[in-house]
Each structure stands twice: as C-alpha cells, then as structure tokens.
Image: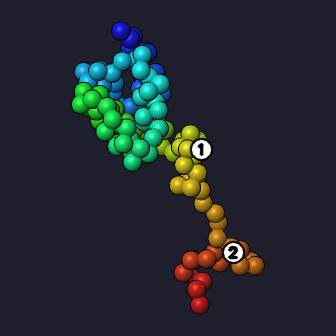
Amino acid sequence: MTTPDQERDLREVLRLKYLPIGEGFDIRHLDEYERFLGLTIDEQQIYMSTVSDDAAELFIALLTARALYKDPVDRHPGSITQDKVNAYPDRYQWEIEAADVDGAHLKGDRRHDG
C-alpha cells in the first residue's frame, strides 16, 4: 500500500496520469515498468508478446496512463515560464531579423518595402 504522496511521486517518476492499480500495478516491479516505458514502440510490442495476457493488460494500461500524462511544465497553458523556455527552447527561441543601417527597416516590415 502506498500513501498519496508516494503515488504522486511514482506518477511523476514514471510520467503517468494515474497508477493502473486495478490492472495489477505493483511497486515491487517499478524497475520493470521503467524499463518497459523506456523502450521504443517496436520493442514494447515485442516485449508484450512474451508476457501473459494479464501482464500485457497492465503494460497497455501503463502506456495509456503515459499517453494521458501532462508534464508539469505544460499544465498551466497561457503562461510562458522559464521552465517552459528551458523545456522547449526551439518553441520559444526567437531572433530579431537584420535591420538596415539606420535601424528603421526590419525584414518583413512592409512600411518601407520599396
């Protein structure tokens, strides 16, 4: 049995929306779950073909819980925080286009396009 704090921590470590307790989630197999979730899709399919039907249901539930997971950085839409910038530098990086000599004309500025 785990406490609510332990469950929250487990969800964050495994990046799961919920722990699939009803499908047989057992904290004693945490390393196995982490390894499985770290596999590629093809490797996961091969792995699931080697386990029992009950175990496959658990792994499918883990994949479902992972698909529904939202990273804490993305949980508050609308606010661009430093955590979001750090997590997604390509998304939030921008550069000023080159200006002409007097600085009045920026690339794409249609007011001065001739």
Regarding residue 77, the answer to whether it shows in the image is no
Residue that extends furthest to the bottom in the rendered view of this protein? 114
Query: How far from the left and from the top, in percent, is residue 52?
Result: 27, 29
Dot 2 corresponds to which residue?
99
Regarding residue 44, the answer to whether it shows in the image is yes
Quadrant hosting residue 102: bottom right
Dot 1 corresponds to which residue?
86
Q: Foreground residue, 110 or 85?
A: 85
Which is nearer the N-term, disc 1 or disc 2? Answer: 1
Q: Name the residue at 38% across, 11% down.
A: 2
Q: Foreground residue, 25 or 2?
A: 25
Query: How far from the left and from the top, in percent, is residue 6?
Result: 43, 15
Q: Secondary structure at mark 2?
A: loop
Cβ–Cβ below 8 Å for labels 1 and 2?
Answer: no
Query: How far from the left and from the top, in percent, is residue 27?
Result: 40, 17
The C terminus, quarter of image: bottom right
Amino acid at the residue labelled 1: Asn
Q: Nearer the viewer, mark 1 or mark 2?
A: 1
Amino acid at the residue labelled 2: Ala
